[in-house]
Image (cartoon, rainbow, N blue to C red):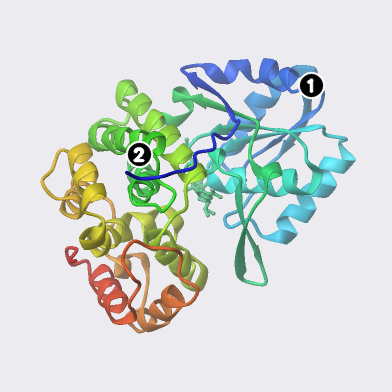
Amino acid sequence: MESFVYEALPTRVVFGSGTVARIREEVERLGAHRALVLTTPGRGEGLANEVSSLLRDRSAGVHAGAVMHTPIDVTEKALSVVRERAADALVAVGGGSTIGLSKALALRTDLPQVVVPTTYAGSELTPVLGETAQGVKTTRSDPRILPETVIYDVELTMSLPPALSATSGLNATAHAVEALYARERNPITSLMAERGIGAFARALPAIVANPSNREARAGALEGAWLCGTCLGAVGMALHHKLCHALGGALGLPHAETHAVILPHATAYNAPAAPGAMGLIAGALGTADAAGGLWDLAGRIGAPRALSDLGMAEDAIDRVADLAVANPYWNPRPVDRDAIRALLRRAWAGEPPEA
Ligand code: NAD
């Protein structure tokens, strides 16, 4: 018998097609009158302007200032915009970078957040924020960080390019894979994780074949919700530690790094988590969990080598050192030599090995 503690997080989720039209109603529901719409500069601004129009008199305008890794100076600039415009709510329209800015502002102001995700990263369902100051990313958890409302609108994901859909989907899949062997795992998160992995295994090849496949897009977004909920509910292990080390020390791109590392971290943990491996393989419809993830990445054209992301071979030792310093809890003890071997295989683009 396994004991567990399960605590559901109180985010309201509105899921469907065309659901962004409900943005004003959702902001009103939180008792807010002036919502500041956040996004990244560039192509996201058009959508943010549309959301601002939908808010009508409840909009405090758009601030297109979010950037990756939530640098503190970017947050401080946005904080002055919140104050100047007397905003009493935040609306984030975009991927994990935009949501990161919204969370950083909510942490400092306790303003309510309505998040409209346009990638599959899953940040919208967690009370966790990673912030960067002087090149160092620190992570913290606080109830103020958790968004009050998430609006998933399949239509907003139709434009996510196939390559980004593939890596973002594998980033989400990684949350579910690690949830299945997490120390805090429980029957609810395990059900969500299995279903989330299965949703992406079906949806991602279909999206890459035809990015306009609305049914596949809906499947992937449902997968993002399920996998993101797992990320918010249980602790993550070696896979996330390795990705944080690679992203933090070398500035490798977030979703792509997750895509490369996932089969290798899964293979590493396979001997210590046979039950989880069976569930992952079952969800993927393959005989072997790590092999199935490797094949999935190949089929959807996701990167499979850290060298292709611009990592130099002589950085392997530095990352191995970081991965074993203050390791996250992991089902298999984290051994430096074995981690170095894992990283070398991932660097070279070789298949995973336990
Ligand atoms: P992102 O937000 O940086 O977006 C990647 C790119 O995709 C951007 O250029 C963006 O403009 C574009 N884009 C987004 N949606 C699009 C769409 N529908 N159509 C076309 N282009 C679109 O990437 P991400 O992977 O979503 O987020 C990564 C960040 O999120 C990292 O900083 C990571 O640390 C953070 N994150 C945090 C958590 C958490 O719980 N705190 C969880 C997951 C990710």
The residue depicted at 44 percent of the width and 41 percent of the height is 230
Element at label 1: loop
Mark-to-mark CA distance, 1 and 2:
35 Å
- Foreground: 119 or 290? 290
| Figure check: 309 above or below 184 | below
Q: Which residue is mark 1?
A: 31
| Figure check: 306 above or below 314 | above
Quick one: label 2, few (<14), some, or many (20+) residues within 10 Å? Answer: many
Residue found at the very far left of the displayed protein: 287
Number of dots carrying numbers: 2
The amino acid pointed to by label 2 is Ser
Q: Which residue is mark 2?
A: 190
State which mark lies toward you, 1 or 2.
2
Quarter of the picture holding the N terminus: top left
The amino acid pointed to by label 1 is Gly
Disc on the earlier residue, 1 or 2:
1
Please indicate whether residue 67 sits to the left or right of residue 210 in the image.
Answer: right
Quick one: label 1, few (<14), some, or many (20+) residues within 10 Å? Answer: few
Residue 42: x and y in percent read 58, 43
Residue 299: x and y in percent read 18, 45
User: Residue 270, can we see it?
Assistant: yes
Kindly check if marks 1 and 2 are in contact, taking CB atoms under 8 A apart as contact: no
- Foreground: 275 or 78? 275
